[in-house]
Amino acid sequence: MGRDFDFDFIVIGSGFGGSVSAHRLTEKGYKVAVMEMGRRWTPENLPHTNWSLARWLWRPELGLRGFFNMRFFRHATILHGCAVGGGSITYANTLLVPPEKVWSIGPWAGLADWQAEMPRHYQTASRMLGVVENRILGPADHLLKTAAEQTGVGNTFYRTSVGVFQGSEGDPGGKTFADPYFGGEGPQRTTCIGCGGCMIGCRHGAKNSLDMNYLYLAEKHGARIFAETRVVDVRPLDGSGDGLAGYEVRTVSSTSRLGKSKAARRFTCRGVVFSASSLGTMELLFHLKRQGALPRLSPRIGQRVCTNSESLIGVRIPGCEDDMSKGVAIGSGIYIDQNTHIEATRYPAGSDAMFALATILTGGRPGPARVGLWLRNLLAGLLLHPIKTFRLLRPRGWARESVILLCMQALEGHIDMVWKRPWFRPWRRTLVSRGPRIPTFIPQANEFAQKLAKVSGGTAMSMLPEILFNVPGTAHCLGGCVIAGSPALGVVDSRHRVFGYKNMYVCDGSVVAANLGVNPSLTITALAERAMSYLPNASEHKWEDLAAQA
Ligand SMILES: Cc1cc2nc3c(=O)[nH]c(=O)nc-3n(C[C@H](O)[C@H](O)[C@H](O)COP(=O)(O)OP(=O)(O)OC[C@H]3O[C@@H](n4cnc5c(N)ncnc54)[C@H](O)[C@@H]3O)c2cc1C
Ligand code: SF4
């Protein structure tokens, strides 16, 4: 090609898809850079509780430079991570294989023999992320089991599969060992102490976040990671419409207070992997298509966005003797029917900031009637049981006294995102959700929460935005740049190659075309493993030939 490139591949985002891509590309001999908008986290700078808002929440324009973000859309409140290691720094370590039926839902159905191919990639992903059956059951897990038994579904109780370095059952943890996973190539690990702190970042060296495996190995073998670096432009070099001549990637600092233009940089590369998560990749691709940098992108960007049909509810047991925050963040789960899955979830003691989103459980028809019912319940509680209601709503002790129930359903259903100027911010385009409303609560899950409340002597809780704005919350936004057979149906082909461009891939949750009904990170990892397995080693690579396949 006769040109010097800064890198062979630039990977945008360092979450599950990005870290796998960076590691496998580096292993194959490519020169790789990873651009990551979030910060690097270590046990020294992670927050102790989520009251350290500046180190927990990500809103750099407000001086909040943490690793957890919430985005508010008309159809859903979407929770996601932003860090070197992507969502793995804040996630709850739960790594589950979805039911086989998901491969026959949506436009990826029939494009590959998924059922035959995926098991080996799930195996590799599980080995790399150090997945074990959870050996630390806390009081919240025991409560879930008791309530499941009393509801007649005790046989479905299971311990979650988690990416955590754990000692044997009953071991108090806290013992440090030389790398137990990668034959001495990886970092030392310390056994889990069951403090429940996984979602505010593990300060104890037990959580197998991506900076401890895929990213760690990628960096060790030469990948360069640019933290606090946001990609704002990607376009083919030399006006080659399809990227055969390589790409130019422009970045700005995501945290600099000097003004974005001062930190602007330009890089060149032969290929690009978009791994900025479902929301991040949609946002970038919409922007790049709209401004003419990548005009050949499929018009299907933003379609088939899945929220995993989720609902967050819970039970608070004021004054309980047991500490509900003990265990790993998600220690166990049950199935209350064949489509509805509930996991017992927790924050560590002292991390009570989520109290602001919790209130008395309220069902009923969404809208003003439901808000009215909620106000009535609240007022009745304050008048009839003032002390109990006050103890339910007070911030202090929220994490120690609460079992959060994460409810997911593997059902067909999705919304779309469009790129437009919302009425409340007409000067800038952004993602706007549209489509049928997503149910804000799952009646059978609410019933189960009430059962658990009865068993424990606690009070069932709903998420406030679900009641006030009829908007459900989800930590598992997927899709928007889905795998399909043609650009008329999706954005990438079954090997994650972007339709219309050469040497351009999408490897993250945005390619997933179905509600998985389980936490999705293992699937995102396994899909990225599969996509990368099709690339040849750098020494055997003829860029023009590879490009010709796309
Ligand atoms: C509180 C919480 C708990 C969760 N628990 C679980 C769990 O237990 N199990 C599970 O399977 N899943 C869990 N999830 C979901 C999980 O975190 C995501 O599904 C997963 O991280 C998605 O992987 P990804 O590769 O698509 O992107 P991500 O991991 O989100 O990584 C994308 C990265 O790209 C970066 N980025 C975005 N735009 C740009 C840009 N323009 N330039 C540079 N960088 C950019 C972002 O900062 C981010 O770090 C949880 C999520 C949350 C919020
Ligand atoms: S429970 Fe505590 S020690 Fe174990 S992985 Fe989570 S944060 Fe780390």
Image (cartoon, helix red, strand yellow):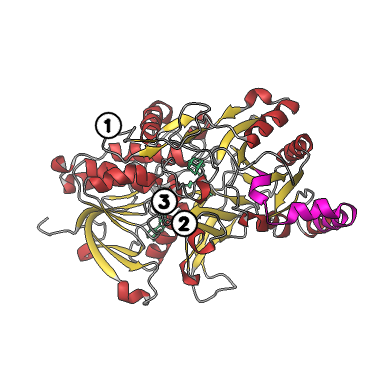
CB under 8 Å between callouts 3 and 2? no
Q: Which residues are magenta?
A: 374-403
Q: Is residue 480 magenta?
A: no
Does residue 531 sit above or below 15 in this rendering?
A: above
Q: Position of residue 383 (x, y in %)?
A: 89, 57
Q: Is 94 in front, or is 286? A: 94
- Asked whether residue 339 appears in the rendered view, the answer is no
SS for dot 1? loop
Q: Is residue 472 left or right of residue 62?
A: right
Q: Is residue 382 magenta?
A: yes
Disc 2 crowd rating (10 Å Cα; few below 14, some 14-19, many 20+) is many
Determine the main secondary structure of the stretch shown in magenta. Answer: helix
Q: Nearer the viewer, mark 1 or mark 3?
A: 3
What residue sits right under mark 1 in the picture? 183
Q: Is 323 in front, or is 7? A: 323
Q: Position of residue 279 (x, y in %)?
A: 47, 56
Under mark 2, the amino acid is Phe
Under mark 3, the amino acid is Pro
Q: Nearer the viewer, mark 2 or mark 1?
A: 1
State how far apart marks 2 and 1 are (Cα).
30 Å
State yes or no: Cβ of the residue under disc 2 lies below 8 Å from any atom of ligand 1.
no
What residue sits right under mark 3 in the picture? 43
SS for dot 2? loop
Q: Earlier in the sequence, mark 1 or mark 3?
A: 3
What residue sits right under mark 2 in the picture? 67
